[in-house]
Image (cartoon, rainbow, N blue to C red):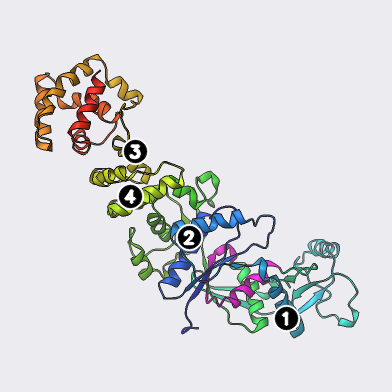
């Protein structure tokens, strides 16, 4: 298989959203294939018809699209391939690698109860395994794989290492149910084979499944793909990631305002490493990613690290790209898009908006003074800063700004000189200025706001607040 082009796949079950763990699995598969000029395929494992709705599938596709994880070829529906799965079960039956089992649920339950009472393994051993077909009754049956009872199944896993499972620990799994429908365990193997998958990169909760699925590969004489079972993601408390730890769906992170590039970077680092590199580009991730960089231990989701990586990506992002990201964020949360003049004003202000910003909403929040129009609505602290004394000060200040040169040095000289003449320091003057210019108590620098707003708008806001 060394010369075979790499083919990976992401095979989610549609549950209504793209889980953050599933997103990481998709990313690892995407990086591994794309970094080697291979193919990345998408299969929807939609055999559970009660949960598999078009809306649920759409949610997964939207999440992947936002993350930028493009796939090759058409999307494969596992449910639509049921006839092919059944065909393989019949072929194994014809080859003698599977058998018809007529045992009822009551008989299986009785077998297990007796095995427990006698201290034996409760793995069901069907009496029909080696039965003469002539003895078969005219009754419903399932098709079971005739798994080896002795020896070992060895998985040479690229993450977990050499995993050995005794065949006496594996049962004769059902491949085809009595209603003729295939089981998931069979369908996965048939689909992976037919899709030409060379590397199965998935969560380590599937490790035991791999041992059973390898029996199907052996029965059909098919090449076994390379397996890489990656540890699950845990919360900060070391327990399996769940709702109590916060957001689980990729769309929730989009709505929180993390750029897609930052999420790709963070998810790549969640269980995989390249030396001490924390922040990197897609190009670097594609060049560096390999299976031997994946750790065996569970990764812990850490919002502080995500914020740090997100802040680094925002700081390094081209202004035009960042404006596009802001528009995408506003669209995702149902916000009003930036008008062309607003977008230009925000782009011009990026040098003061980017520093310290960890998410896209933080940039918009800092840019609020550019996006509001008169009359400026004041928050509680800003309103409190505009008392009678402060309004009187603004009334006196405004004429001094009318003819001042509109550059930082001049503005600093005028405002500091005015504060000194009032027998105070500029810090005392800053609060009413922030309130007048932005309607907020916490804003970018007063001088930055005045320069970006321009003379006419700045003075108009000061005059309005002084009334």
323 lies above or below 155: above
Packing grade of label 4 (10 A; few <14, some 14-19, many >=20) is: some
What residue lies at 29% left-to-right and 35% top-to-bottom?
369
Q: Say which mark, if any, is on residue 365.
A: 3
- Of label 2 and label 4, which has the lower sequence position? 2
Q: Pinpoint residue 273: horizontal percent, then vertical percent.
A: 39, 63
> Which badge, 3 or 2, is on the more N-terminal residue?
2
Mark seen at residue 323: 4
User: Marks 4/1: CA distance?
Assistant: 57 Å
Rate crowding at label 2 as few (under 14), some (14 to 19) or many (20 or more) other CA atoms within 10 Å.
Answer: many
Element class at badge 3: helix
Q: Which residues are magenta?
A: 183-206
For marks 2 and 4, give the CA distance. 26 Å
> What distance separates the C-alpha of mark 4 from that of mark 3?
14 Å
Which sits in the foreground, 114 or 53? 53
- Label 4 vs 3, first from the N-terminus: 4
Residue 208 locus on image (x, y percent): 62, 67
**SS at badge 4:** helix
The residue that disc 1 covers is 92
Residue at the image point whose x is 30% and y is 24% from the top: 382
Q: Position of residue 305 (x, y in %)?
A: 38, 51
Q: Which residue is mark 2?
A: 24
Label 2 or label 4, whichever lies nearer to me, is 4
């Amino acid at each position: 298989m060394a010369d075979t082009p790499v083919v990976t796949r992401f095979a989610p079950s549609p549950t209504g959203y793209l889980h953050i763990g599933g997103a990481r699995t998709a990313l690892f598969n995407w990086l591994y294939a794309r970094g080697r000029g291979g193919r990345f395929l998408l299969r929807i494992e939609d055999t559970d018809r009660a949960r598999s709705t078009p809306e649920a599938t759409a949610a997964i596709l939207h999440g992947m699209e936002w993350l930028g994880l493009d796939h090759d070829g058409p999307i494969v529906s596992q449910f639509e391939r049921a006839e092919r799965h059944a065909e393989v079960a019949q072929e194994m039956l014809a080859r003698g690698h599977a058998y018809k089992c007529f045992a009822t649920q009551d008989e299986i339950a009785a077998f297990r109860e007796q095995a427990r009472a006698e201290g034996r393994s409760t793995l069901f051993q069907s009496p029909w395994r080696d039965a003469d077909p002539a003895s078969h009754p005219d009754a419903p049956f399932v098709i079971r794989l005739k798994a080896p009872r002795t020896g070992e199944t060895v998985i040479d896993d690229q993450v977990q290492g050499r995993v050995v499972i005794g065949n006496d620990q594996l049962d004769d799994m059902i491949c085809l149910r009595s209603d003729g429908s295939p089981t998931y365990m069979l369908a996965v193997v048939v689909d992976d084979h037919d899709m030409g998958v060379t590397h199965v990169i998935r969560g380590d909760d599937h490790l035991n499944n791999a041992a059973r699925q390898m029996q199907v590969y052996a029965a059909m004489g098919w090449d076994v793909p390379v397996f890489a079972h990656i540890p699950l993601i845990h919360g900060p408390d070391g327990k399996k990631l769940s709702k109590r730890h916060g957001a689980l769906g990729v769309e929730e992170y989009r709505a929180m305002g993390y750029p897609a590039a930052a999420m790709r970077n963070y998810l790549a680092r969640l269980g995989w490493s390249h030396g001490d590199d924390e922040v990197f580009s897609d190009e670097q991730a594609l060049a560096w990613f390999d299976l031997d960089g994946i750790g065996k231990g569970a990764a812990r989701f850490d919002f502080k690290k995500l914020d740090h990586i997100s802040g680094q990506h925002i700081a390094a992002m081209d202004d035009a790209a960042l404006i596009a990201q802001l528009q995408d964020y506003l669209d995702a949360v149902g916000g009003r898009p930036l008008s062309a003049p607003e977008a230009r004003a925000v782009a011009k202000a990026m040098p003061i908006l980017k520093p310290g910003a960890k998410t896209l909403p933080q940039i918009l929040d800092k840019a609020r003074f550019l996006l509001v129009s008169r009359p400026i609505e004041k928050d509680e602290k800003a309103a409190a800063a505009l008392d009678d004394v402060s309004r009187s000060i603004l009334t006196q200040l405004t004429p001094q700004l009318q003819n001042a040169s509109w550059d930082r040095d001049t503005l600093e000289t005028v405002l500091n000189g005015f504060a000194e003449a009032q027998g105070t320091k500029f810090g005392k003057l800053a609060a009413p200025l922030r309130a007048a210019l932005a309607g907020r108590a916490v804003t970018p620098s007063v001088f930055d706001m005045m320069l970006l707003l321009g003379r006419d708008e700045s003075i108009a806001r000061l005059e309005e607040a002084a009334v």
